[in-house]
């Protein structure tokens, strides 16, 4: 597991927007290039936008076949090098598609669709390096250190645990259950994010009551939001070329990505969460003053569309 701290400027007007994306499978039948272009436009037009990649950016070799292919190449360095070069050529086209994210990424996870080069590195590491992003491996924790440049007193941390993920279900609820039962209940954090399933959903895990270890006796509350991030791959395509979704008879999922928006707001001191007040003022007493607080919203977002029949 990889851990990092990412500083980000926060303001009352714009806040910080984290675009969570994954499962492009850009070189496979079904990649929705038009949806990716709209994602690009929304990202570039959003003030203070950051990206978090959840893996499966390309479709180089499926996991079911990768081990066999690598085993066959284990004693043939020349052929392995040729395959490596072909993967790089295909990936260079993907890097052109992702160039707008350079320098604006919180990090990039690996996924199931990844190729291991002869030197031990992999294709997702290559993407991260090209886009000047931190490689986050399979699971990572990120502490967003949020604050206004002119305010050195009121700073906030928003913690995110993210992963490409492994659990899926034919129904959205089953995948949300996997995320809540395996990730959300294992980490005390503000947000958990997962890709892999190409399903889009937001949920809030049960509120945790944390018994204080310091200061006055009592409880503090911890709320963990859950985000399932969709993908950019159409399950059913026109023409004779079919995707694995179509061949397996899976339910096609809508093209989506996830958005986490964090803004700085003013709230009456006695309406702000007690744990926040305690950390800022050292008291839990009532106050008529206003205090800065974080306002968080998360939702799935997809390309604009025309309603059927219009």
Image: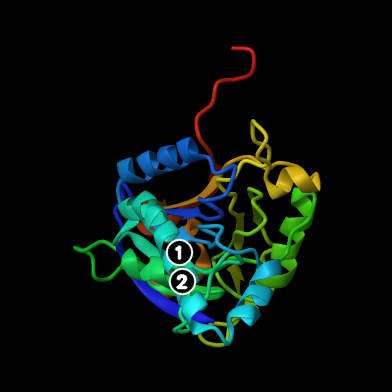
Residue 111, x across and y down, in percent: 57, 66
Is label 2 in a helix, a strand or a loop? helix
Question: Seen in the image, is 222 located left or right of residue 205?
Answer: left
- State the image quarter where residue 255 is shown: top right
Q: Quadrant of the C terminus?
A: top right
Tell me the residue at 49%/56% (across/down).
271
Most foreground residue, 303 or 31 = 31
Residue linked to disc 1: 86
Q: Is residue 284 visible?
A: no
Q: Residues within 10 Å of mark 1 (few under 14, many from 20)?
A: few
Residue 177, x across and y down, in percent: 76, 60
Is label 1 in a helix, a strand or a loop? helix
Q: Which mark is residue 158?
A: none
Most extreme residue toward the top, as rendered?
A: 310
- State the image quarter where residue 205 is shown: bottom right
Q: Are marks 1 and 2 in contact (CB under 8 Å)?
A: yes
Question: Seen in the image, is 56 located left or right of residue 289?
Answer: right
Residue linked to disc 2: 82
Question: Seen in the image, is 101 located left or right of residue 228?
Answer: left
């Amino acid at each position: 597991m990889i851990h990092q701290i990412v500083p980000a400027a926060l303001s009352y007007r714009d806040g910080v927007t984290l675009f969570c994306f994954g499962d492009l499978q850009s070189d496979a039948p079904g990649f929705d290039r038009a949806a990716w272009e709209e994602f690009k436009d929304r990202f570039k037009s959003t003030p203070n936008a950051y990206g978090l990649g959840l893996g499966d950016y390309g479709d180089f070799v499926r996991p079911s076949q990768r081990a066999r292919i690598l085993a066959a190449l284990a004693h043939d360095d020349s052929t392995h090098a040729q395959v490596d070069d072909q993967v790089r050529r295909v990936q260079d086209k993907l890097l052109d598609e992702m160039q707008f994210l350079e320098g604006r990424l919180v990090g990039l996870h690996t996924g199931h669709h990844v190729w291991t080069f002869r030197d031990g590195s992999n294709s997702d590491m290559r993407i991260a390096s090209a886009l000047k992003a931190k490689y986050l491996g399979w699971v990572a924790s990120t502490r967003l250190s949020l604050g206004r440049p002119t305010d050195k007193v009121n700073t906030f941390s928003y913690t995110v645990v993210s992963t490409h993920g492994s659990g899926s279900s034919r129904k959205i609820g089953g995948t949300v259950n996997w995320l809540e039962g395996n990730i959300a209940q294992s980490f005390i954090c503000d947000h958990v994010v997962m890709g892999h399933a190409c399903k889009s959903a937001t949920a809030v895990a049960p509120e945790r009551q944390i018994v204080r270890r310091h200061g006055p006796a009592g409880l503090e509350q911890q709320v963990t939001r859950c985000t399932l991030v969709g993908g950019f791959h159409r399950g059913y395509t026109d023409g004779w070329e079919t995707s694995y979704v179509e061949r397996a008879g899976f339910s096609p999922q809508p093209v989506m990505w996830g958005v986490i928006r964090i803004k700085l707001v003013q709230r009456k001191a006695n309406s702000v969460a007690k744990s926040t007040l305690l950390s800022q003022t050292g008291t839990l007493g009532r106050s008529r003053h206003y205090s800065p607080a974080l306002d968080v919203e998360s939702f799935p977002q997809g390309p604009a569309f025309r309603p059927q029949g219009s």
